[in-house]
Image (spheres, rainbow, N blue to C red):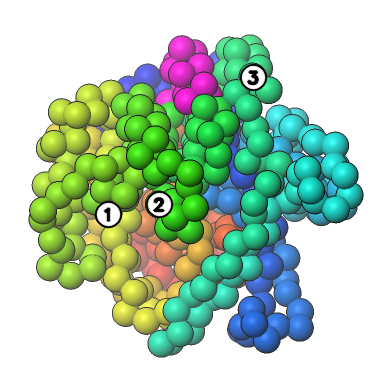
Amino acid sequence: MTDLKGLRPAEDCRWDCVALGEVMLRLDPGEGRIRTARTFQVWEGGGEYNVARGLRKTFGLRTSVVTALPRTETGALVEDLILQGGVDTSHILWREADGVGRNTRVGLNFTERGFGPRGALGCSDRANSSASQIRPDEVDWDQLFGVEGVRWLHTGGIFAALSETTAETTLAAIRAAKTHGVVVSYDLNYRASLWSSHPDPDAARRVNREIAGLVDVLVGDEYAYAACLGIETTDKRADPADSRPFDALVARLAKELPNVQVFAATLRDPVSASVNRWGGVLWLGGDRYATAINEVAVLDRVGGGDGFVSGLAYAFMGGLGAQAAVDYGVAHGAIAMTTPGDNAMTSLAEVKGLIEGRGAAAIR
């Protein structure tokens, strides 16, 4: 078996993919440092949303996002950036704001790209954001998944960890999606800054375990399983891009999480901020599919993992099989890291060219 089971036909659905998560403003100092910047370039970004944007802009699929924004100028800016990305905005929840951010606001993410020996650096300012206040009863899940129709729901551990209500919302969305036959992917996406300030990390792990037990596609390496789910492995990597500890863990995961069809992980070795060894692996039906580990030049590493997930989802939704899924994911993620901002500024032709070995050759 090389294909996902249960994918709804495209003609029966309005949306190929819907993402559930926070969309923030990313403030990028370019080649400079946050602490000395005088200008910032502004992008939109979010671990879950990036997948929907990649599926729309690179792969041409129909996508929407479930998120929340304040009725402020910064909220309008996020909406405008989402529209530029081609992602539908009809499922955005709009909050009335007090004008100074006391009751609700747009989350901010200051991100340095890094260079050579200086690693990438993120500095978030996202407390009390509109998305962190989403409650499960605010969205008509039956209308979205049943009446409109969705083939694939993507969400992740960043959104689920924002608050107690976002964890409840994530569970409600996934349960409703499964009721309507929607394939669900979940990226564990461990973030130390979120977990260090979480009021009850043990409760968060219990929620993540429940979520992981429901989804079809689970993304994360052995470190993410330990941090987010409390599932430990004693195996150690021979080098940072070694998949053997993850591979060994999959046999156990398949028993503990029998509903999961695909276990997938990126493999990254940051030789420097500017050069990474990069690849990916996935398991489906007890079989392993992987890419070679290659060195890629990195301009901006943020979004590489999200590019991996969107390439993987595109291949599975297109019936291309498991090996194509990991190939498209790794290629798309690699190109995502050659451009500024969270999202890949690329085309399907460029992704195919990289998979076929043409690399930087001109694509016509």
Residue at the extreme front of the image, as rendered: 199
Place of residue 115 in the rendered image (x, y in percent of width and height, measured from the top left): 48, 84
Could you say which quadrant of the image residue 216 lies in?
top left
Q: Is residue 226 left or right of residue 76?
A: left
* Gap between marks 1 and 2 measured at Cα: 8 Å
Q: Which residue is mark 1?
A: 223
**Label 2 SS:** loop
**Picture residue at 14% right of the left edge, 54% below the top:** 245
Q: Residue at x 27, y 54 (%)?
A: 223
- Give the image location of residue 199, x and y in percent: 48, 44
Q: Which residues are magenta?
A: 171-183
Q: Residue at x 46, y 12 (%)?
A: 179
Are the residues tagged 1 and 2 within 8 Å (C-beta)? yes
Q: Quadrant of residue 275?
A: bottom left
Q: Is residue 47 magenta?
A: no
Going from N to C along the chain, the mark reached first, 1 or 3, is 3
Q: Which residue is mark 2?
A: 190
